[in-house]
């Protein structure tokens, strides 16, 4: 089941990112980046809370054992949605999301290769390097 579910969830997430980027861009142009980010986080936070409480509440046991830096995820999310909302109406969805995606792949490759931030180390091999080169070449064609 996970062999089908995991990629399906990833694909749905990718579609949602693209749709969110477009919607946030419209709000960003009309009302500004600050309003776009605030609306996105407020509405998303409300939905997350409602879903959590409708399905049994939030799990907080063990939260104190987590490293401090994992709690930066909310601030990082603000950077993400702010960047998406700002960039997409100015560069277009294709260019903007391509640049965002390339930066994700490059950092992800470094995290995997070096085992950064507690990640399982997955050393870079020739096929991954080739994949990154092809990704960069493709990105250059999309962004030009």
Image (spheres, rainbow, N blue to C red):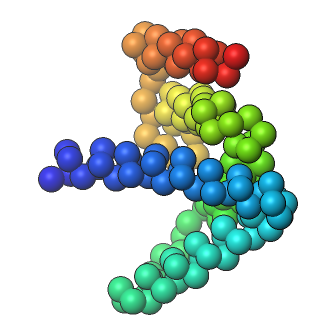
Residue 58 position, x and y percent, is: 46, 84
In front here: 4 or 19? 19
Q: Quadrant of the C terminus?
A: top right
Measuring 62% from the left and 50% from the top, which residue is drawn there? Answer: 22
Would you say 11 lies left or right of 18 here?
left
Q: Does residue 20 lie above or below 144 as drawn?
A: below
Residue 68 in sight in this render: no
Q: Does residue 52 lie above or below 121 as drawn?
A: below
Residue 103 position, x and y percent, is: 64, 32
Residue 13 position, x and y percent, is: 44, 52
Count of numbered circles in the view: 0
Q: Does residue 132 lie above or below 8 as drawn?
A: above
Measuring 56% from the left and 66% from the top, which residue is drawn there? Answer: 66
Would you say 83 lies left or right of 136 here?
right
Measuring 63% from the left and 39% from the top, which residue is drawn there? Answer: 93
Would you say 74 lies left or right of 59 here?
right
Residue 144 in sight in this render: yes
View extreme (left): residue: 1
Would you say 92 lies left or right of 8 here?
right
**Residue 116 figure quarter:** top right
Residue 113 position, x and y percent, is: 51, 28
In front here: 47 or 131? 47
In front here: 128 or 17? 17
Measuring 45% from the left and 48% from the top, which residue is drawn there? Answer: 15
């Amino acid at each position: 089941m996970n062999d089908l579910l995991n990629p399906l969830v990833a694909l749905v997430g990718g579609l949602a990112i693209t749709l969110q980027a477009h919607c946030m861009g419209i709000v960003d142009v009309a009302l500004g980046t600050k309003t776009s980010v605030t609306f996105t986080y407020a509405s998303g936070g409300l939905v997350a809370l409602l879903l959590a409480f409708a399905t049994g509440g939030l799990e907080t046991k063990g939260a104190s054992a987590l490293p401090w830096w994992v709690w930066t995820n909310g601030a990082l999310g603000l950077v993400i949605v702010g960047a998406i909302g700002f960039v997409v109406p100015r560069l277009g969805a294709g260019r903007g999301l391509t640049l965002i995606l390339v930066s994700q792949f490059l950092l992800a490759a470094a995290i995997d290769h070096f085992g950064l931030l507690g990640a399982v180390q997955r050393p870079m091999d020739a096929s991954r390097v080739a994949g990154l080169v092809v990704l960069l070449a493709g990105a250059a064609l999309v962004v030009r």
